[in-house]
Amino acid sequence: MESAISCGRVALSPNQIFQPIPADKYPRHKQCTSRSSFTSMPIAALGKGGGGILEKPVIEKTAPGRESEFDLRKSKKMAPPYRVMLHNDNYNKREYVVQVLMKVIPGMTLDNAVNIMQEAHYNGLSVVIICAQADAEEHCMQLRGNGLLSSIEPASGGC
């Protein structure tokens, strides 16, 4: 689409700016020295053909079988959550379990770690965190690497 450039209040086409009339004493591109005063206007708005009708924008579609970046982000958010479970054992001290929970799980507070440890101690099992499958697997492996018994399970069934 062709556009015209306006300098102040005079609308000029690109031809008038870049190819000044030889008889002009002051070419128009020299008259407008401030770049901030240039604005672009469609030629149709100046009354040259087209009646001011704009063309319909073309919307790109992704190829079949290929997802856009937005779709990939959406699918990651919609992945089913998994629970990281802590199992009670008779080998680790309570203080050690709390320290490992705070070290392995991001954002774990002392109070939450103590509550999780107590629940696992009294009930035999406790939910540590609910997160995406990849994160749940990583947390589970880190807990196991520090000597705790843990597992993961899909969080879709109940609370």
Image: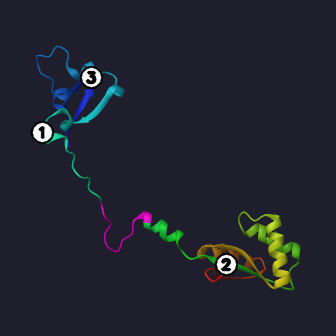
- Residue 104 image position (x, y, % from top left): 73, 69
Does residue 7 appear left or right of residue 15 in this picture? right
Identify the secondary structure beneath mark 3: loop
Which numbered disc, 2 or 1, marks the residue closer to the eye? 1
Residue 49: percent from the left, percent from the top? 12, 39
In the rendered structure, which disc, 2 or 3, sits on the residue that comes first in sequence? 3
Q: Which residue is mark 3?
A: 9
Q: Which residue is mark 2?
A: 83
Q: Amino acid at mark 2?
A: Arg
Say which of marks 2 and 3 sits in front: 3
| Residue at 72% over, 63% down | 107
On screen, residue 4 above or below 76: above
Marks 1 and 3 close (CB-CB < 8 Å): no
Sequence-earlier tag: 2 or 1:
1
Give the residue drawn at x 82%, y 65%: 110
Is 14 within the magenta?
no
Find residue 60 and report its horizontal and vertical position in percent: 30, 60
Q: What stretch of residues is rendered in magenta?
A: 60-70
Q: Which mark is residue 49?
A: 1
